[in-house]
Amino acid sequence: MSDFYVGYLPKAPERLARWLKPVVALLLLLGAVLALLLASNQRAIGPSYFEYGTVRTLEGVIEERPNPVLWVARPGETGSVTGLSRFLLVGAGKHGAAEAVAGMDGARVRISGTLIYRGDRTMVQLEGPPVRVPGEPVERPAMQSLGQVTLMGEIVDGKCYLGVMNPGRGKVHRSCAARCISGGAPAMLVVLDVEGGWPAMELVGHDGQGLGRKVLDLVAEPVTVNGELLRYGDAYLLRTGVENITRGVGRSASGRATKHP
């Protein structure tokens, strides 16, 4: 039989098959090794969740600024400042919750919504307007200043990053993040490679409002931010201004916080 071989014939010529079989096996092995190498170098997708289709009812106290939140007493710890959880609030789609909670600062309400969470940060997508309910006022914790810091990271929209989309960051997510922040989702800074896994922190202006639309041009890019790190209940906030945010990161890309004297 000639060495000429047509693919639909049942059997290749013997001399051709002798070298073709090991070549095919080698190519398959190289393909598998290449796939493993590529997979091992991919950035891990964070453990974030969106309980789509599951609506929960929560009761707590509204706070309008710097970003709309609901302060909820943890079971068995009612009335304790340290026993409060701070749930960020957003609307459906690419909308915030500022309009839904306008004029309700300090009011006790009942809400229905879907949980969005990543690590120990939780957000609620409202499924309707909050309803005022009777109850005692809640003493919210005071903001604790942790000093001036320099942080390197990426600005994201809190809704997608915390769980609606995963990983919810990077260049491919830029346009979505910009639209979410424009609609009222909180702008947050994801700090790069910090030991212990610092959570994403809300970006707050010196006027006490969320930075929001002011940082649209800096979304999904590596940035260096100078500001005052704040601890507020179980959340971290970074008080800064657009003038204190620069594109790019320093020579050390570790993203570790540098505390200023």
Image (spheres, rainbow, N blue to C red):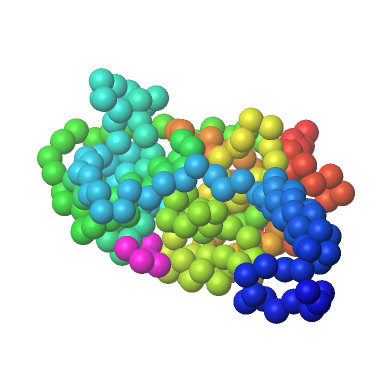
Asked if residue 226 shows in the view, the reply is no
Percent coordinates x, y for residue 196 in the rendering? 64, 30
Residue at horizontal 76%, vertical 58%?
21
Which span is picked out in magenta? Answer: 92-97
* 96 in magenta: yes
Percent coordinates x, y for residue 137 in the rendering? 24, 35
Asked if residue 94 shows in the view, the reply is yes
Q: Main secondary structure of the magenta part?
A: loop
User: Does 233 sit above or below residue 166?
Assistant: above
Residue at horizontal 29%, vertical 22%?
77
Q: Residue furthest right?
A: 251
Q: Residue furthest left?
A: 134
Quadrant of the image occupied by residue 18:
bottom right
User: Does 168 sit above or below residue 81?
Assistant: below
Quadrant of the image occupied by residue 40:
top right
**Residue 221 vs residue 7, the one in the foreground:** 7
* 70 in magenta: no
Percent coordinates x, y for residue 210 in the rendering? 50, 56
Assign the C terminus to one quadrant of the image: top right
